[in-house]
Amino acid sequence: MGRGCRGISSLINRLAIEPELPVELLQLNQETLQAIRNLENGVGVHRVNTIDELKRDLGW
């Protein structure tokens, strides 16, 4: 079992005993905060005007 699976199992076991999310999961890291700021400021955001345009961009 990989570390990710063990981590999830550990979280599930912890939630069974203490039914609230650990504070560590609620704290955003710097990378996430920067991604949110970029999104809010339109940095790296690609917009489309129609559903057809979106489908074309997605290759549908």
Image (cartoon, rainbow, N blue to C red):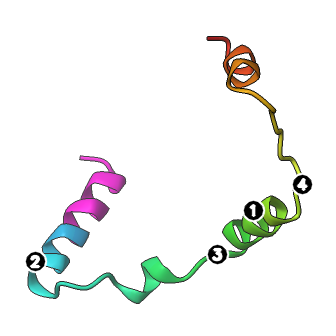
Q: CA distance from mark 2 to mark 4?
A: 40 Å
Chief secondary structure of the magenta span?
A: helix
Q: Nearer the viewer, mark 2 or mark 1?
A: 1
Circle nearer the N terminus (1, 4)? 1
Give above or below for 18 relative to 36: below
**Mark 3 crowdedness (10 Å alpha carbons): few <14, some 14-19, many ≥20:** few
Q: Return the x and y of residue 12 as percentages of the image width and height.
A: 18, 68
Identify which residue, 11 or 3, lies in the foreground.
Answer: 11
Residue 9 is one of the magenta-drawn residues:
yes
- Write down the residue under mark 3: 29
Give above or below for 37 relative to 14: above
Horizontal side of 21 relative to 60 (left or right) equals left
Q: Amino acid at mark 4?
A: Val
**Mark 1 crowdedness (10 Å alpha carbons): few <14, some 14-19, many ≥20:** few
Q: Are marks 2 and 3 in contact (CB under 8 Å)?
A: no
Q: Are marks 1 and 4 in contact (CB under 8 Å)?
A: no
Magenta segment = 1-10
- Write down the residue under mark 2: 16
Circle nearer the N terminus (3, 1)? 3
* Residue 43 disc label: 4
Q: Return the x and y of residue 10 as percentages of the image width and height.
A: 22, 69
Image quarter (top left, top right, bottom left or bottom right) of the C terminus: top right
Circle nearer the N terminus (2, 3)? 2
Q: Return the x and y of residue 23 as percentages of the image width and height.
A: 41, 88
* Residue 23 disc label: none
- Write down the residue under mark 1: 35
Q: CA distance from mark 2 to mark 1?
A: 32 Å
Q: Amino acid at mark 2?
A: Ala
